[in-house]
Amino acid sequence: MKYLLNSSTDPYFNMALDEFCLENIVMEEPYFYLWRNRPSVIIGLNQNAYSEVNLPYLRANGINLVRRVTGGGAVYHDLQNLNYTIVGKSSPVTKPAEGPGLTPQPIIDALRRLGVPAELSGRNDIFVEGRKVSGYARRVYGCQEIIHGTLMYDVDLETLTHVLDTPESKLQAKGIGSVRSRVANLKEYLPGFSTLDELQSALQEILADGEGIIELSEDQFTEVQKMADEKFATWDFIYGRSRQTGFVRKAKLPCGTVEAAINLDHGLITSISFSGDFLFDEPVTELESKLTGCRFERAALSRVLNDATVSRCFRDTASATILDLLLH
């Protein structure tokens, strides 16, 4: 296969590149590129950011939250994870029930040539000896389709479990230990490679099989960056697509115990109610009303809380404390 070179580790740029290639770079034969992201959680197009991801952990550790243009679940990327993208024409004779024309089989075959007994398993995973090393997703656009996926080489599995560990998550229900037992890093199966750079070079050589490089123009890269800035890195795309969800935040504060029951839709507060044994000088009903309709993000909440008489609703408690409670 012919291939692109993509050295960017900006997850917003890389998601934009996938969409740009799918919609604009049409070739007679499939082509591919390998790429990496700095620490990020990538959620599926239709997932709810608030219920699928441990957002406080992401904020505390400087991990990006990114939404992709394909379906599937949330995945964790870091610089020891190698991603692949394959783009090609979708077959007009392929029936939906028969599955996509493109599959990760070239990736599986390449891993096998390197001595890894990889196999396709389940809906969209690659397993090695019963342990998951990769997941992938796809999307069709007109006569084109794309598949992209992960290849965990030496990913920080502790961080992986934390970023996806929410009260509603399957990770918490099954326990971190069991999650670790079901996933694996390819480094365990590739003793002949000392770095991910070496593995990436080897995979690229096998997949390319002597084919040449596809060059994008400066104008095309500029367009990709524009898509990254104006779509993929925006609050509207990352959070605003999230559908209805609800959760409760609770903490013991200087005023007493405060519990906030919050309901969101498309990232906006549709209702919020405070309860608890906290002391106050005036009821919280006016504050609840001001917060309703607000974006559930730090800057917007901070503006409302700074305008409100928080210390009168929650005696001896600062606005920043209530903000931390809501975003915890």
Image (spheres, rainbow, N blue to C red):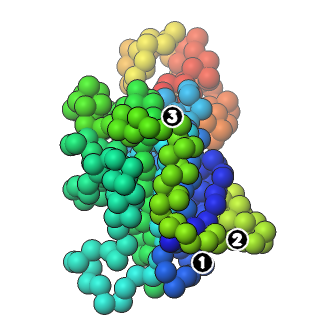
Looking at the image, how many numbered discs can be counted on the residues? 3
> Residue 308 has which mark?
none
Q: Are marks 2 and 1 in contact (CB under 8 Å)?
A: yes
Q: Residue at x 39, y 57 (%)?
A: 110
Q: In this rendering, would 258 be left or right of 97?
A: right
Q: Disc 2 or disc 3, which is closer to the eye? A: 3
* Lower sequence index among marks 1 and 3: 1
* Lower sequence index among marks 2 and 3: 3
Amino acid under disc 1: Ile
Q: Measure the alpha-carbon separation of dots 2 and 3.
A: 31 Å
Q: Residue at x 40, y 31 (%)?
A: 157
Give the quadrant of residue 94: bottom left
Q: Disc 1 or disc 3, which is closer to the eye? A: 3
Which residue position is annotated with label 2? 216
Amino acid under disc 2: Leu
| x, y percent for residue 115 | 34, 47
Amino acid under disc 3: Ser
One can see residue 232 in this view:
no
Q: Residue at x 68, y 65 (%)?
A: 224
Q: In this rendering, would 298 be left or right of 239?
A: right
Residue nearer the viewer, 277 or 131: 131
* Lower sequence index among marks 2 and 1: 1
Q: In this rendering, would 295 be left or right of 134?
A: right
Q: Residue at x 56, y 28 (%)?
A: 61
Which residue of the protein is positioned furthest toward the bottom in this rendering? 93
Which residue position is annotated with label 1? 25
